[in-house]
Amino acid sequence: MFENLLENLPASLLRLGILFSGQGSNMQALIESLHQRTFLGKKPIIIEVALCLTNKSKAPGIARAQKLGVPCVVLEPANYAQTSDFERALIEHLSLARCHLVLLAGYMRLVSPLFLEHFPTLNIHPSMLPHFKGKDALRASFEAKEGTGVSVHVVTPQLDSGPIIAQQALNPKPQESLESFTQRIHALEHQLYPKALLQALGLERFT
Ligand code: GAR
């Protein structure tokens, strides 16, 4: 889907930006499986997570990014007069870090059409889209006993609506608690997101 992106890369280096708002466990999984590794496609490609960025100054994910040695910037919308100023600042940071592609990893804001003109962007969502778009999808699908699973999709200006790249259903076990099911969904997310990205880029794991 994004194979063309790789053809014009200088030095065969793909630079990623990751946006998050909370725990950052998906960000960590992406860094651990992709950062500074070489992948095989039409030619070998090195992936570099160039920048992590959060809209929440107290996000626990900040410490995770620091521990993993990846630069992490905090940009709080409240510090900007208008949403469009915040969005421009986001674009500026990701552009300065020379990011080619952006991954939303528990980033709980919509991104603007202007943002999407600058960066092809993917998102992970804890339900079988189009079931249960928006916040609290994991709990809502668990309680409804349908649409449970994980989706990775291309981001469009509409909430949780772009083309699906990968999807995997996961059903609660009989009597399973929400806490236990949440852990299993997160474990699935951590595997599916890097795999879906590589699939969208037409890349295979090499090192
Ligand atoms: C993940 O379950 C992710 O799918 C979800 O937020 C959680 C973030 O966890 N995203 C959405 O609901 C997006 N609509 P993490 O911060 O530990 O990665």
Image: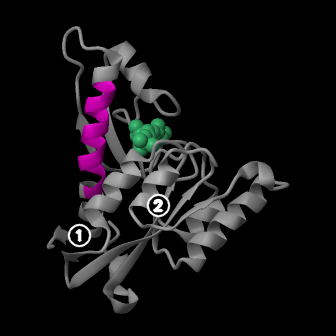
Question: Per the image, is 184 magenta?
Answer: yes
Are discs 1 and 2 less than 8 Å apart at CB?
no
**What range of the chain is rendered magenta?**
181-194
Q: Earlier in the sequence, mark 1 or mark 2?
A: 2
Q: What x and y, as percent, mark residue 11?
A: 35, 91
Q: What x and y, as percent, mark residue 151?
A: 34, 42
| Amino acid type at image mark 1 | Gly
Residue 202 position (above or below residue 155): below
Residue 107 position (above or below residue 199): above
Residue 139 position (above or below residue 40): above
Outermost residue on the right side: it is 81
Question: Does residue 101 appear to the left or right of 174 in the view shown?
Answer: right
Residue at image mark 1? 202
Q: Which label number is shown at residue 104?
A: none
Q: Viewer-proximal residue, 13 or 31? A: 31
Cα separation, mark 1 vs mark 2, equals 30 Å
Picture quarter with ligand 1: top left
Q: Secondary structure at mark 1?
A: loop
Q: Which residue occupies 38% across, 35% down?
A: 126
Residue at image mark 2? 66
Q: Secondary structure at mark 2?
A: helix
Residue 186 position (above or below residue 147): below
Is residue 155 at least partly visible in the picture? no
